[in-house]
Image (spheres, rainbow, N blue to C red):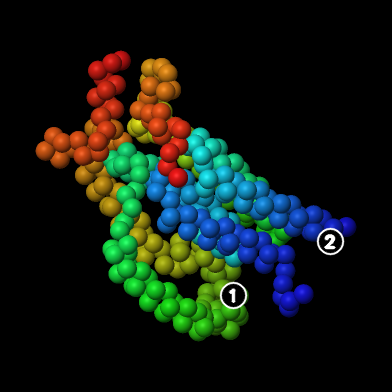
Amino acid sequence: MEQALHYLNVGTAMFLLIGMALLLGRLLSGPTLYDRILAVNSFGTKTVLFLCVFSLIIGRQDGIDIAILYALMNFIATIAVLKFFRYSALDVSMNYSSRGDLSKTVVGKAEMSGEDT
Amino acid sequence: MMEGFTPILLLDMGLLAMLVVVAFAVVRLRSLFAIVMLQGVYSLLSAAWFVSLDAVDVAFTEAAVGAGISTVLMLGAMLLTEREAKPVPFQKQLGPLFIVTIVALAMFYAVGDMPAFGDALSPANSYVGADYIAATKNDIILPNVVTAVLASYRSFDTFGEVVVVYMAGLGILLLLGLNGNAGKWRAKPNGQNITGRKNTAEQREDKP
């Protein structure tokens, strides 16, 4: 039973690695910036899951702590990236309410359609 | 099957293969935004690998600094520059390529002298290291030897490092200023907009 659980964990970790590789392909090929943001965000989620499963495999609980820290850090990075493309600045106050049309913001249409690869 | 081939080794190989792919992509891609994202992915992958090497402390630092703060810092730096890296002509790449090749060959030469991973007879484990591992349990009531060495045995050293990091941060803050311009500022030497883009902060004030 224990052995079967171990192999189940290893198999889960392998499939998570395959998922990470697929996301890496999406991150490299683009084509738009939002594909990349989503790919990085779900890559972070995959890493959190991988660390949890991996700490089960090696039998140490420390991996769970790092996984929790990752979940928090991933959130910060994604918020910073989205602020960067929405306002082209990082210190925007929370009650800055001029939202407007996304296509008129500073990112511009050329960057949103992703002509960078 | 090979001797010593474990499932964990297979997972390590997968992580390292993805690290190599990310590193090549960081070098080859021109879009700076994609490179910043890939650096975040690189730090995520390397921290997962540090966990598998039992270096939990390093993985913690990598998670906090590499994935969180440095992505934000790189984005802040991107506000001051272009969004695309200019291609470097081939002649300018030859000198760096030469240096990198020499250094890589030297490192590969040195790998042969390194002890195996987890070798109990390696120099790091056999002389003073063994004493610290034996004495930590009685001297300092901490389960983690690395934490005990950093925070207790050489705590003055660590305190000095913390002071240095604090001074560096304070100096950078004094240089960039705390007047609310951080992150909005665009480089304009002699009033010239070298980024070729309009100052978005001014744009916002014109048309609220």
* Disc assigned to residue A3: 2
- Count how many numbered circles sit on residues in the image: 2
Residue nearest the viewer, comparing B65 with A30: A30
Identity of the residue drawn at 51% across and 42% down = A30
Q: Position of residue A29 (x, y in %)?
A: 53, 45
Name the residue at 44% across, 32% down. Answer: A112
Q: Is residue A77 above or below residue B93?
A: above
Residue closer to the observer: A15 or A31:
A31
x and y percentages locating residue B203 in the rendered image: 27, 23
Residue found at x 66% / y 48%: A19
B193 shown above or below B148: above
Quadrant occupied by the C terminus of chain B: top left
Is there any visible trace of residue B177 in the rendered image? no
Q: Where is residue B44 in the image (x, y as percent from the top left)?
A: 54, 52
Which residue carries the number 1 mark? B117
Amino acid under label 2? Gln
- The answer for how far apart the CA atoms under marks 1 and 2 are is 26 Å
Residue A5 placement (x, y as % from top left): 82, 55
Residue B34 falls in image quadrant: top left
> Which chain is disc 1 placed on?
B
Could you tell me the amino acid type at mark 1? Phe
Q: Are marks 1 and 2 on the same chain?
A: no
Q: In which quarter of the image is the N terminus of chain B?
A: bottom right
